[in-house]
Amino acid sequence: MKPILYAHPFSSYCQKVLVALYEHDTAFEYRRIDEEAHLRELAVRWPMRRFPILVDGGRTVIEASTIIEYLQWRYPGELPLIPDDPDAAIEVRMMDRVFDNYVSTPQQKCVFDAVRPAGVRDAHGVAEANAMLDTAYAWLDQRLAGRTWAAGERFSLADCAAAPFLFYAYWTHAIPERHTTLLGYRKRLLARPSFARVVDEARPFREFFPLGAIGDE
Ligand SMILES: N[C@@H](CCC(=O)N[C@@H](CS)C(=O)NCC(=O)O)C(=O)O
């Protein structure tokens, strides 16, 4: 039996897992949550109603990073997305957390704020989120110097996170031109076949991005 992924192609956290699945050409059943029945199934399995979730042999795995860890254990690909070497694995997991907490979280804050009714918007929170993105961009620009991928020379879990999060972060709060290392890394991610496929699958939904999609990638 193939694992089942409940996901939507335009969701950044789903894209994170899709990159991992496409990297290793892992067979899976895609239950898109824009189908009402699938959304209901998701809500039964995870009352937070956040996606993606993975269901495998009756077991429900939540949280994108954990799903990728699970896939690596149950459906390993040729090159692990989390290295066996504990020292290298720490760097990968650390960078994954950085992209989740300091790129995706503030990016989502801006997007969620934009879809709130005008009277209950949180301008102060959005300013804080943009400041966090600026700090993250500057830190990443330094940290990634001399690296091909987020944690070194091997594509990893951290790149699965970085690809969609930097993609949407750029649309939300542009990465300054002076951060050439970070912008170069974002370009490499876009050229990676697993992520290029994800971007293509999400293309039909761009009009739903509340802050407006920019760039021609
Ligand atoms: N911490 C979760 C975050 C998942 C998440 O926030 N997914 C978004 C889509 S990108 C979602 O479910 N949004 C629906 C909502 O907020 O109601 C993970 O790592 O998987």
Image (cartoon, rainbow, N blue to C red):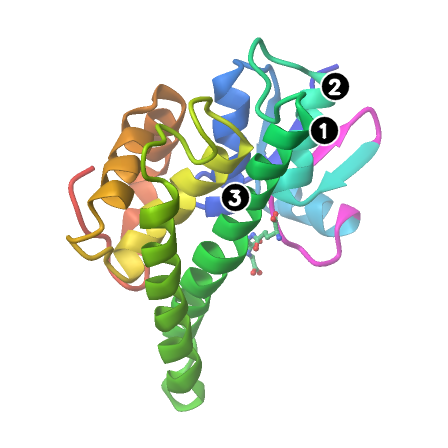
Query: Where residue 33 appears, x then y in whole percent?
Result: 57, 43
Q: Is residue 15 above or below residue 174?
A: above
- The image quadrant where one finds the N terminus is top right
Question: Up-down: is 46 above or below 199?
Answer: below
* Magenta stretch, residue numbers: 45-58
Q: Residue at x 29, y 48 (%)?
A: 206
Give the labeled residue for mark 1.
70
Residue 209 colored in magenta in the image: no
Task: Give the side of residue 69 with respect to residue 185, left or right.
Answer: right
Magenta span dominant secondary structure = loop
Q: Amino acid at mark 3?
A: Met
What secondary structure is found at the residue carrying circle 1?
A: helix
Which residue position is annotated with label 3? 95
Q: Which mark is residue 141?
A: none
The answer to which image quadrant residue 83 occupies is top right
User: In this orientation, does residue 3 appear?
Assistant: no
Near-viewer residue (188 or 37): 188
Q: Residue furthest bottom?
A: 119
State the image coordinates of residue 114 (x, y, percent, origin top left).
36, 72
Most foreground residue, 143 or 31: 143
Please tell me whether mark 2 sits on a helix, a strand or a loop.
Answer: helix
Task: Say whether residue 145 is visible.
Answer: yes
Q: From the viewer's perspective, is 96 left or right of 108?
A: right
Q: Earlier in the sequence, mark 2 or mark 3?
A: 2
- Residue appearing at x 33%, y 34% in the figure: 199
Q: Which structural element holds mark 3?
A: helix
Of the residues under marks 3 and 1, which one precedes in the sequence? 1
On screen, residue 116 above or below 68: below
Query: Which numbered disc covers residue 74?
Result: 2
